[in-house]
Amino acid sequence: MSIDSNLAMSATASGGRVLSGMRPTGRLHLGNYHGALRNWVQLQYRYECFFFIADWHMLTTGYEDTARLPEFVREVLIDWLAAGLNPGVATLFIQSHVPEHAELHLLLSMITPLGWLERVPSYKDQQEQLKEKDLATYGFLGYPLLQSADILVYRAAHVPVGEDQVAHVELTREAARRFNHVFGREPDFEEKAERAVKSLGGRNTTLYRQLRRRFQETGEREARERARALVQSNNRITVADRERLLGYLEGTGVTILPEPQVLLTETPKVPGLDGRKMSKSYGNTIELREEPESVTRKLRAMQTDPARVRRTDPGDPDKCPVFELHKIYSDETTRKWAAEGCRSAGIGCLDCKQPVIDKIVAEVTEMRRRAQEYVENPELLRDIVAEGAEKAREAARETLEEVRRAMHLRAD
Ligand code: TRP
Ligand code: SF4
């Protein structure tokens, strides 16, 4: 048995669900591919995966321009399929087709302190960076909590995201912990836990209370660690009481919403045509389904080491964005050939670019081939997301039923 199928088995056996989302920004580019999609394609064969297009999230930073939203959603979906996401294996859907996300978001909003949201780094950052947009809305402040609901509604174990989203998953963990704390306890859990606190005895009782309060109010990890150590090193209490005290500390009695883990994606840096990070807002992208002639034209004009003005000037691959592409697309021999030829001025930049051009042209050609049937038959897309929404809702409904029951919101 290969290592890969072993991995697949253990991941399935552990029952870990994977969830991730992407905003419908329109056609995706190679930066999106290497930054996320390529990883998702691999994950789908190892885990039960849910991938969704976060159309509601798009509204949190731009509520006025919704006219092109359907088009953007469609383009992203086609790009996903072009990249190799397989609707027979992974559940692909659109956020707004699963209203349970919104219901859980609302319920979580009731127990989420404002300070948690105000402290999410992207809140202030984006308000400063996107001055032209109206980000003084309730929706924008709540956006990370909507993301928490996206994750928790599937009780996902793993969330593959980049560095920029880690704080959001952290908030998700806090929201889950809080929810479990408030609504997930056995009827007499609190009483039993309080009795256990007293049995710690004297100074330890006081200390536990202080640390617990500090951790729950501020999320201070150090307070939690100290309280855990205090409980674990105490051998006067019973095993059952120890469990209660740990649960009481974390706020978990019965776990209704499990805490997800970040699955940090190792992503190569994908340079854009101008040498800056590839990004739609910089207009320096190569799209996943770009015409091959256009790929060739763009790459031939791509920024190189600025010090290499003439063919006879030696260059420095470490200062050249094209070389970053070699790191992604070329084998070792080609990379060495490029680096040495650059430093010795033995090759010209167009020579150096050619193997990268060939690889990317082959890649986009394959993507275009896979996309073709969906471009020609848009009803296939409708079927895929209808089926995806159905599967997603089934999972989401199950969670919501438990959530409603725990909150005494069941009608029947
Ligand atoms: N906020 C993410 C982004 O901007 C997209 C997203 C929304 C997401 N909900 C999610 C990612 C849930 C992972 C899990 O890229
Ligand atoms: Fe960049 Fe290659 Fe030109 Fe060197 S030879 S500057 S690595 S494109």
Image: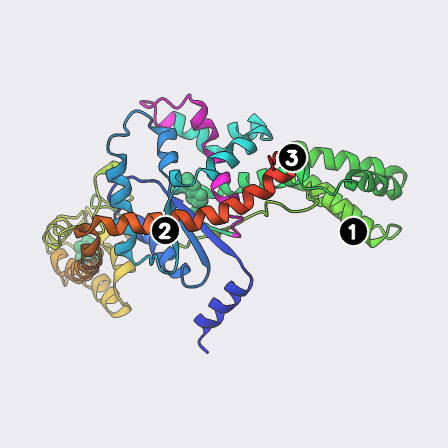
Residue named by callout 2: 387
Q: Is residue 55 left or right of residue 343?
A: right
Q: Position of residue 18 (x, y in %)?
A: 47, 53
Q: Residues within 10 Å of mark 2 (few under 14, many from 20)?
A: some
Residue 355 bears which disc, if any?
Answer: none
Residue range (magenta): 128-157
Q: Tell me which residue sits at (37%, 53%) in the image.
A: 267
Which amino acid is tagged 2?
A: Glu
Q: Secondary structure at mark 2?
A: helix
Q: Position of residue 138 (x, y in %)?
A: 45, 23
The picture quadrant where one finds residue 122 is top left
Single out the mark in the foreground, 3 or 1. Answer: 3
Single out the mark in the foreground, 1 or 2. Answer: 2
Earlier in the chain: of badge 2 and badge 3, it is: 2
The picture quadrant where one finds residue 211 is top right
Query: Magenta stretch: residue 134 in it?
Result: yes
Can you see residue 319? no
Of all residues shown, which one is farthest toward the front?
412
> What is the C-alpha distance between the residues marked 3 and 1?
34 Å
Which amino acid is tagged 1?
A: Gln
> What is the C-alpha distance between the residues marked 2 and 3?
31 Å
For the residue pair 93 and 213, the one nearer the viewer reads as: 93
Q: Is residue 185 left or right of residue 295?
A: right
Q: Position of residue 257 (x, y in %)?
A: 59, 45
Of all residues shown, which one is farthest toward the bottom?
1
Residue named by callout 3: 408
Residue named by callout 1: 232
